[in-house]
Image: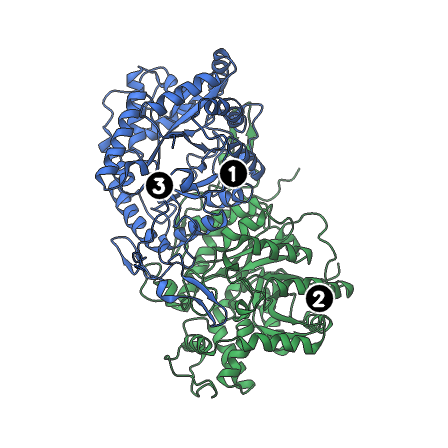
Chain colours: A blue, B green
Amino acid sequence: MTRTLHLNAFLMNTGHHEASWRLAESDPHAHTDLAHYVRLARAAERGTFDSLFLADGPHLWGGVAQRPAGALEPLTLLTALATATEHIGLIATASTSYNSPYNLARRFASLDILSDGRAGWNIVTTAGAEAARNFGLDAEPAHAERYARAADFLDVALKLWDSWEDDAVVADKAAGVWGDDAKIHPPRHEGPYFRVEGALNVPRSPQGYPLLVQAGSSEDGKAFAARYAEAVFTAQQTLPDARAFYADLKARTAAAGRDPDHVKVLPGIVPVIGSTEAEAREQERLLEDHIVHRYGVDRLERLLQLAPGTLELDARLPAGLPSEDAVEGAKSRYTLVVELARRERLTVRQLIGRLGGGRGHLTFAGTPEQIADAIGTWFTEGAADGFNIMPPVLPSGLEAFVDHVVPVLRARGLLRTSYGPRRTLRERYGLPRPVNQYTAGPVSA
Amino acid sequence: MTRTLHLNAFLMNTGHHEASWRLAESDPHAHTDLAHYVRLARAAERGTFDSLFLADGPHLWGGVAQRPAGALEPLTLLTALATATEHIGLIATASTSYNSPYNLARRFASLDILSDGRAGWNIVTTAGAEAARNFGLDAEPAHAERYARAADFLDVALKLWDSWEDDAVVADKAAGVWGDDAKIHPPRHEGPYFRVEGALNVPRSPQGYPLLVQAGSSEDGKAFAARYAEAVFTAQQTLPDARAFYADLKARTAAAGRDPDHVKVLPGIVPVIGSTEAEAREQERLLEDHIVHRYGVDRLERLLQLAPGTLELDARLPAGLPSEDAVEGAKSRYTLVVELARRERLTVRQLIGRLGGGRGHLTFAGTPEQIADAIGTWFTEGAADGFNIMPPVLPSGLEAFVDHVVPVLRARGLLRTSYGPRRTLRERYGLPRPVNQYTAGPVSA
């Protein structure tokens, strides 16, 4: 079978560019408007994307002044979108630090059932003290501890999703026996963080469990991905970096005893599309002109864990910033930003401009053909199994991608031309359905 | 304004009768079939019901042998139903003992936004050790402690739902100011059970917060209802009992400083509908014939907290059962069952037959006119503001109610004949939108 691209549409209110809400075309209330998200989901489905994705954190980050703040809870919104779509996968972010395994496993199983096998879980450990303080903690748990908790969470969630064998429901009306208790397996889990006794109260779902997605690129994050993830979102600025990340993650996955083809790597890309290169640059400039720099300085100081007022707009980053090892927050994003500023010798103002579009993801401005070229190069040169498409402005940026870039990718044989029959999300990504861990091997006839 | 009935459709897989799944007409996989629930929701909307309701507990109760076990997570299922309906309210059960306020408040706000103000929350404290052991506890917390936690949960949830003033989003594109931070109010809650620092990350929803519903009829439950509930579901077997409960709850609500008209009382009723009384009795008998008595004995022994094997099918309940005060589980249900058995001198077999239909709720078998008579009597004689309709078999029992009982109720002027314009769930129940606790009083002009 020919290898083809996997495309994920990363949805975010009026778009990934922080100034997108200020454009004349944008609805500043889009983030609570179901019709806006239905329009986006249908555009992505027209483009035969594999999946939709919503990022998340359980806190209101940095107030509401600078841009659309907060968001509908992702599993809730994706459940509504499940009924408005037919083929596309639905990937929700949810935190292992601020959920209980029983409730979250059940919610994903429920969405997987309601969507006929289209649920995915972007597993995050949630950086930051703001989130911690919404859940009774004084401070953010240490990075390593968050990942240890995530591993225990996954262990018990996987037991819960397998706690009904696929054929546990016998529905024998005559005998008055609905289910076979011998095919129900309570986890009786006693881990370092979680104790969960009983079976899930939802039958095993079409996919067995949601597609497991991960996006942390720190050492802990990559180790976690190698063990559990079936798709990985990553921020990479250059082809060599992206190839190195790709090779490293595949090798780690093999070393963890898994088929490296069973983890799909999707770098994020912010496509700024014009009918000419000049038009694309003009769109990029328009967005940059709408950035409010004092907000950008605030955000950069938070990310770099600097005191307010440290950074100056027209100077470079200060020397002597600590290494990633000393940071407890979003480790890999920290390093990416510091290295980008150093490599390209950017002032704070320039760095804010570069980050405004995609928060560290690669922005690529050009014609549909140029964007398809870049995608094709990364895909064929060992840097990507597909892409996390992050339009700077929504819905127009996603619709432009679907109407203008998708046809080029299809003409080049890089992308499916139709969905064909209904499939699960895991099937779209070319991955096998997980075998239930409690199911005995086949009995010989 | 004429006082009219409020009707809530209590949905449950193949119906409220425990043997319903065994009937030829029933789909034993209905409980995971979205199309089944869409059909039910649309039937209820055809009958101009105020709301749909899903019960819940975060555990697999008593294994899977005896009847359809487990259920899709209610908020998830109701979100899917929100997109398939236009007018009807959506009431989900969720536990204050096994959720965190930040996450749950956010999920209800999200559903309220997605449904244009149709969300309701049936607040439960969740009895039973099985649930407790799915969340790291060894045993069920004491009844009083569960209610103390529920009160703290409500306090912080109400702060979270008010943490955005209604006009916090200013969306000033020219100035680059999206929201007004002065209209965001972090709860900074430090209660006996919960500490929550930050504002919710969802704007205030159309209703302000979901309709608050409650169903516990113990002393703690009634005190809680008087303080918080806007609608109360209750199980009452006789008109005098129902009138006494109604008067008591209204009085307690007034004593708590609230308008007693702002809590609506809805007893549960299991309508077994026939075109003649004999046909209704025949349907009742058909269902009773499908009861598996050994399951009923199991369940009764659990409810009464008796050792397995204590009860005998053709004997009465043993003497010397403890009073409700000594029971930590579902207190009011315990008393209702013990009193029903004593009052009507039922054997265990007869008691199981009576409970099989509605687990303690009133079963009424008759013609549409007879059922409308009963409803009308309770409604006009101070026993009910409306009813929680619990069809024994689904979808047929709900469709029969809508097609045959609803027209009689409408003809008698007891029920609306159409929804009219779109309204919030709280408006349907004739309740005011809550004022934001952080909003200052009106400034004089």
Taking A206 as reference, is A232 left or right? left
Residue A210 location, x and y as percent? 40, 46
- Looking at the picture, do discs 1 and 2 lie on one chain? yes
The answer for how far apart the CA atoms under marks 3 and 2 are is: 51 Å
- Looking at the picture, do discs 1 and 3 lie on one chain? no
Question: Which tag is nearer the camera, tag 3 or tag 2?
Answer: 2
The N terminus of chain B lies in quadrant: bottom right
Amino acid identity at mark 1: Lys
The answer for how far apart the CA atoms under marks 1 and 3 are is: 30 Å
Question: Which tag is nearer the camera, tag 1 or tag 2?
Answer: 2
User: Chain under label 3?
Assistant: A
Disc 2 element: helix
Taking B140 as reference, is B272 left or right? right
Instruction: Name, please, the residue furthest toward the front.
Output: A445
User: Which residue position holds label 2?
Assistant: B405
Residue A212 location, x and y as percent? 36, 42
User: Chain under label 2?
Assistant: B
Viewer-side residue, B27 vs B297? B27
Amino acid identity at mark 2: Val
User: Which residue position holds label 3?
Assistant: A124
Viewer-side residue, B333 vs A5? A5
User: Which tag, 1 or 2, sits closer to the chain's start?
Assistant: 1
Disc 3 element: strand
Residue B378 falls in image quadrant: bottom right
